[in-house]
Image (cartoon, rainbow, N blue to C red):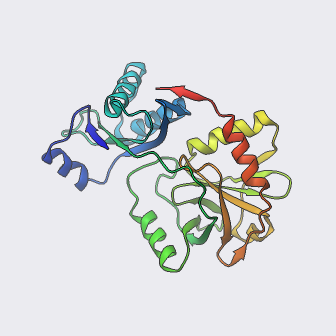
Amino acid sequence: MNVELNGRAPDLAQLHRIATVNYGHYTCMQVRDLRVRGLALHLARLADASEELFGHRIGVAEEHRLLGLIRHALDDVRDASVRVTFVPGSEEPAPPDVLVSVSEPAPEEPRPPLRVQTVRYERELPEHKHRATMGLHYRLREARLAGFDDALFVGHDGRVREGTSWNVAFWDGAQVVWPDAPVLKGVTMVLLQIALSINGTPWTLRPIDAEELSGFAAAAAANSHRPAQPIASIDELPLKDDGQLAEALQTAWQTVPWDEL
């Protein structure tokens, strides 16, 4: 729908620079009626990664500028998927450029439960949502060629990490269990954890070995597109989901407040 670099349509030279340098970080958010869930968390993600990857601190004035760039790219669109990406500026040590991409809002109708394949993989700098996604997409492609819908990463220590573009939650029959591992702390995951606590739904964060997966009753993928996407099976292991996990996550998600852009 629209792409802007520092508030303007990028020219050919700028597009070439962005496309050929795979460095930077980003956040993705769902905008509805010019509102976003977890806006402060999105801004904090951008600030943390900007400082580590570019040595650039984001202050209050920069946050206001970012929000202005998002609103400018949206123009009169009120519902959309928005991606804010920090890319290298034309010259070092200039601050990074800000690329705002506005696209159609993510569909909200339910998807069939996912069939996922476990793969040995650990993202570089897993705490950041960065542009170095070659390994991620390679594993996703391999999983799909093998007949699965997506991939679930397991580290070289044998512990469950995260999905390709989502965090994973499990249900042990009594509570929601999130893997304690080097992963991206997804905004949706953090908001769900806060909402679960407020709602009184028990949850825990602990290391999960791949060998333990057969002991869980259910699993779900969580990201900004779908906060409670059921997982039907992991490898050849079917999950006999009775709906408790998806219901718990969806109920919690509905209580998460919206923030004005």
Residue drawn at x 50%, y 32% is 44
Look at the image and tell me whether residue 205 can be seen: no
Image height of 107 relative to 147, above or below? above
Percent x, y of residue 162: 59, 58
Q: In the picture provided, is 197 more to the left or to the right than 190?
A: right
Which of the 4 quarters of the picture holds residue 10?
A: top left
Percent x, y of residue 122: 52, 62
Q: Farthest top residue? A: 61
Image height of 205 relative to 54, above or below? below
Who is closer to the viewer here, 4 or 47? 4
Q: In the picture provided, is 227 more to the left or to the right than 81?
A: right
Residue drawn at x 48%, y 31% is 33
Residue drawn at x 22%, y 33% is 8
Who is closer to the viewer here, 23 or 31? 31
Q: In the picture provided, is 215 more to the left or to the right than 237?
A: right
Which of the 4 quarters of the picture holds residue 173?
A: bottom right
Percent x, y of residue 84: 38, 40
Who is closer to the viewer here, 83 or 136? 83
Look at the image and tell me whether residue 229 can be seen: yes
Residue drawn at x 38%, y 42% is 53
Percent x, y of residue 25: 39, 45
Q: Farthest right residue? A: 174
